[in-house]
Amino acid sequence: MNVDLPRTRIQRRNRRAILDAALDVFSQHGFRGATLEQIAQAAGLSKPNLLYYFPSKEAMHQALLAGLLDTWLAPLREIDADGDPLREILGYVRRKLLMSRDFPRESRLFANEIVQGAPRIMPTLEGELKALVDEKAEIIRGWAEAGRIAPVDPHHLIFSIWALTQHYADFDVQVRAVLGTGKGDPFEGAERYLDTLFTRLLTP
């Protein structure tokens, strides 16, 4: 039994290395532009060794997307109907911005999939994601109708939060080029700006 343990650890390590390399390659080149050779080289493995763990490029991409979606939906799930409306929404904005800062490769992977028409995750978008967004939209609508926040279309509010936070991951190079050198971390300024923007938008 002990003889098998090192092999199991090596397999787990190789699988993590492959998925990390695949995330790099897919986020840079998209699914169509990525090749098994690029992923193998980035992982430091041969192509046959790569295919021992994952039978195809599609299998690696699917594994990454499956792991990503739970992480992607978590910030929205945290919106609490019993909390202070403005604090809950601003908290969601900050969580999404932190995800863009901490998981830029994952954000670009997701964006590439959407740009291609979401061929691998459409059932999740139409199912789990839609159900969760509809649920939180009803909470926001209730807050607006009760006068606890300013009137707002809840779905478009959520879309705007996605756009204004994920931009800093998906267009990181553009953001930093426009800001120029010596400006520090763009996420600090982004958080202050978005806090002000949504506070003014949502305060009754």
Image: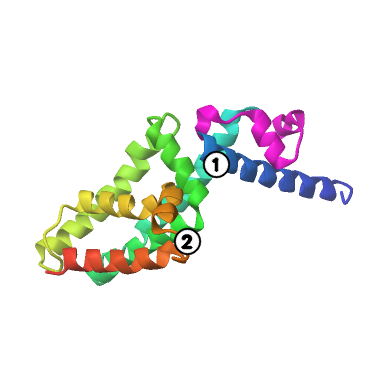
Which residue is located at x 41 percent, y 63 percent?
187
- Any part of residue 169 in sight: no
Which residue is located at x 23 percent, y 69 percent?
86
Q: Is residue 53 magenta?
A: yes
Q: CA distance from mark 1 to mark 2?
A: 33 Å
Residue to which mark 2 is pinned: 181
Which residue is located at x 49 percent, y 51 percent?
104
Callout 1 amino acid: Leu
Give the prevailing secondary structure in the magenta stretch. Answer: helix
Residue to which mark 1 is pinned: 64
- Front-lying residue, 10 or 28: 28
Callout 2 amino acid: Thr
Under tag 2, what secondary structure? loop
Residue 98 picture quarter: bottom left
Residue 22, percent from left and from top: 61, 39
Q: How many marks?
A: 2
| Identity of the residue furthest to the right in this view | 3
Under tag 1, what secondary structure? helix
In screen coordinates, is 24 left or right of 52? Answer: left
Residue 102, percent from left and from top: 50, 58
Say if 6 sits above or below 90 in the image: above
Say if 196 sits above or below 155 in the image: below
Image depth: mark 1 or mark 2 in front: 2
Q: Pointer 1 and pointer 2: residues touching (CB < 8 Å)?
A: no
Magenta-highlighted residues: 30-54
Residue 70, percent from left and from top: 46, 50
User: Is the residue marked by circle 2 packed among few (<14), some (14-19), or many (20+) residues within 10 Å?
Assistant: few
Counting residues from the start of the chain, the first of labels 1 and 2 encountered is 1
In screen coordinates, is 49 left or right of 137? Answer: right
- Disc number at residue 16? none
- Any part of residue 136 in sight: yes
